[in-house]
Amino acid sequence: MGRGVLIGMAHVRDIMEKNVVTIDHGKTSLEAARLLKEKEISFLVVLKDNLPAGIVSERDFVRKLVAEDKTASKVSLEEIMSKKFRWVKPDSLIEDAVQKMLNNNIRRLLVLEDEKLVGVITQTDLTSFLRSKLLINGTVENIESEKD
């Protein structure tokens, strides 16, 4: 079975997470870390003038704060956030999002519409979607083979 058959014509908007936790670029690393802890999440989208300016993940805290022995309350978020982020449009095919993640070895993509943040799609979202598709396709194939 080809990949296209498995994924079908589903779009990013069908599986993206719409409630993305964001933080203003002017906040400190400590404020960002506390927000991660409070919301029990692994990354934040950093906004500047209501537009995405970067992403900060647990990995950024480890590599750019802890490993450098810096004080979180004294380090601006802009110093540790990743300014290079990948994104897709809501009407992008899921297959294209998967390809972009694989090609760039990344775990998440922002979903932008007219430069504004409308969602995020993560490896977890994709795994859940593909798993349900595999189960559904497997069930359909079993039903069809039982008919023979």
Image (spheres, grey):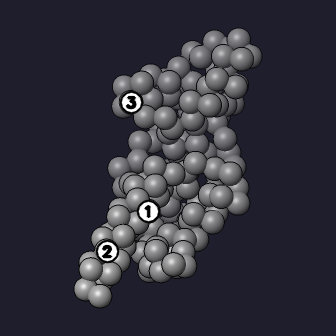
Q: CA distance from mark 2 to mark 3?
A: 39 Å
Bin the neighbour count of mark 1 within 10 Å (Cα to Cα): few under 14, some 14-19, many 20 and up: some
Instruction: Kindly identify the residue that appears in the image at 30 percent across and 83 percent down.
Output: 144
Which residue is labeled 1 in the image?
130
Q: Nearer the viewer, residue 129 or 64?
A: 129
Bin the neighbour count of mark 2 within 10 Å (Cα to Cα): few under 14, some 14-19, many 20 and up: few
Residue 70, compared with residue 44, is above or below; it is above
Q: Position of residue 142 (x, y in %)?
A: 31, 74
Q: CA distance from mark 1 to mark 3?
A: 24 Å
Residue 23, compared with residue 63, is above or below; it is below
Which residue is labeled 2 in the image?
142
Q: Quadrant of the C terminus?
A: bottom left
**Type of residue at label 1?**
Leu
Q: Nearer the viewer, residue 45 or 67?
A: 67
Q: CA distance from mark 1 to mark 2?
A: 18 Å
Single out the residue that lies furthest toward the front. Answer: 148
Q: Secondary structure at mark 2?
A: helix
Q: Nearer the viewer, residue 49 or 30?
A: 30
**Location of residue 14 (image quadrant):** bottom left
- Is residue 54 in view? yes
**Type of residue at label 3?**
Glu
Q: Report the mark closest to the observer, 1 or 3.
A: 1
Which residue is labeled 3 in the image?
40
* Labels 2 and 3: the sequence-earlier one: 3
Q: Secondary structure at mark 1?
A: helix
Bin the neighbour count of mark 3 within 10 Å (Cα to Cα): few under 14, some 14-19, many 20 and up: few
Instruction: Kindly identify the residue that appears in the image at 63 percent across and 66 percent down.
Output: 99
Q: Position of residue 43 (x, y in %)?
A: 51, 38
**Type of residue at label 2?**
Asn
Instruction: Kindly identify the residue that appears in the image at 50 percent across and 24 percent down.
Output: 33
* Labels 1 and 2: the sequence-earlier one: 1
